[in-house]
Image: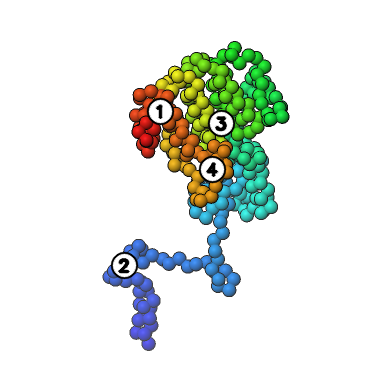
Amino acid sequence: MAMAQTARTATARRPTHDYHRPTRSKSANPAQLRPLSGIHGAAVSSRPRYVPPFSIQSQQKNTVVINGPIHETAPKTASARSRVPNPKILRRQQKSMSTFNLGMGLNGCSAGGANDPGRGTLFRMYFDRGDLPIKMEYLCGGDKIGWTVDIEKLDYSLYLPLFFDGLAETKHPYKTYARQGVTDLLLAGGEKIHPVIPQLILPLKNALSTRNLEVMCTTLKIIQQLVMSSDLVGPALVPFYRQLLPMFNAFKVKNLNCGDEIDYAQKNNLNLGDLIDETLQVLELHGGEDAFINIKYMVPTYESCYLN
């Protein structure tokens, strides 16, 4: 009886682990994470967390950025920001944010929803201030601009680049005044146009960079008229081919493929690919002996009109 009690006591005092048994590392058998279970043992899907903007949490997964600085009127605590927002408040904020973007022009659109690439032109600023010597004449054949001063007495170094800057306009009356003003100035310019050529390159480049079909076609027609307005203009444009011709190369193959149908809009001459070919031919014909090699450098697919 005493021996049984001694054996039982020795067994109770024996340590629960064996120092001679090899132990496993913790990384050899990592603990398995058990999925959270909700009611009736179904797995609970993790909901997205709502985090403040411009924070490190906004770069994490399963997060939604809310409450931008435009709409946030008072600072909120972290617990308040992590709550699920009211859907009605979110829709109201998204609507106000879209209205704000349209009004500020952040989406590249005006408040009416149409593209307005000329909204920041210098021509519009001068026109709104009333500094241009022009007025609108409403005739039975259409609208026409009238000059309040003699057009031959105008300073071409000021007004010709200004009207060329208005070629990027797409809204009436800005585009009407700018396009017809450029036409009138080129018709009456003569030898006054050649000294102003370097100042016309940037407005022409900006108008071509709008990628607007109407603006680009009008600009190409103006370039043709500019080259043929004087014998000195064509060779003077050759050093500026690197600024003007990249957009020619990008849209040279943009032709209208109407199949066997009739294109009734060809009377408007708005086929961009054909206009680019015509303009390149005019530049080559009036640009002198160095015109073709410079055109070929910028537009590799162009073929000389002298050889064909």
How packed mark 2 is, by other alpha carbons closer than 10 Å (few <14, some 14-19, many 20 or more), is few
Which numbered tag is attached to residue 30? none
Q: Which residue is mark 1?
A: 284
Provide the secondary structure element on which disc 3 rests. helix
Q: Amino acid at mark 1?
A: Glu
Which of the two discs, 2 and 3, sits closer to the camera? Answer: 3
Q: Earlier in the sequence, mark 4 or mark 1?
A: 4
Which residue is label 2 attached to? 23
Residue 76 in sight in this render: no
**Mark 2 or 3 closer to N-term?**
2
Residue 94 lies, with reference to residue 281, above or below; the image says: below
User: Quick one: label 3, few (<14), some, or many (20+) residues within 10 Å?
Assistant: many
What residue sits 59% from the left and 12% below the top?
153
Q: Secondary structure at mark 2?
A: loop
Q: Gap in Å between the C-alphas at discs 4 and 2?
A: 48 Å
Mark 3 vs 4, N-terminal side? 4
2 vs 1, front mark: 1
Q: Residue furthest top?
A: 153
Q: Between marks 2 and 1, how big is the CA–CA gap?
A: 87 Å
The residue wearing badge 4 is: 54
Name which quarter of the figure residue 308 lies in. top left
Q: Nearer the viewer, residue 132 or 16?
A: 132
| Mark seen at residue 168 | 3
Q: Earlier in the sequence, mark 1 or mark 3?
A: 3
Find out whether the residues at labels 2 and 1 contact each other: C-beta distance under 8 Å: no
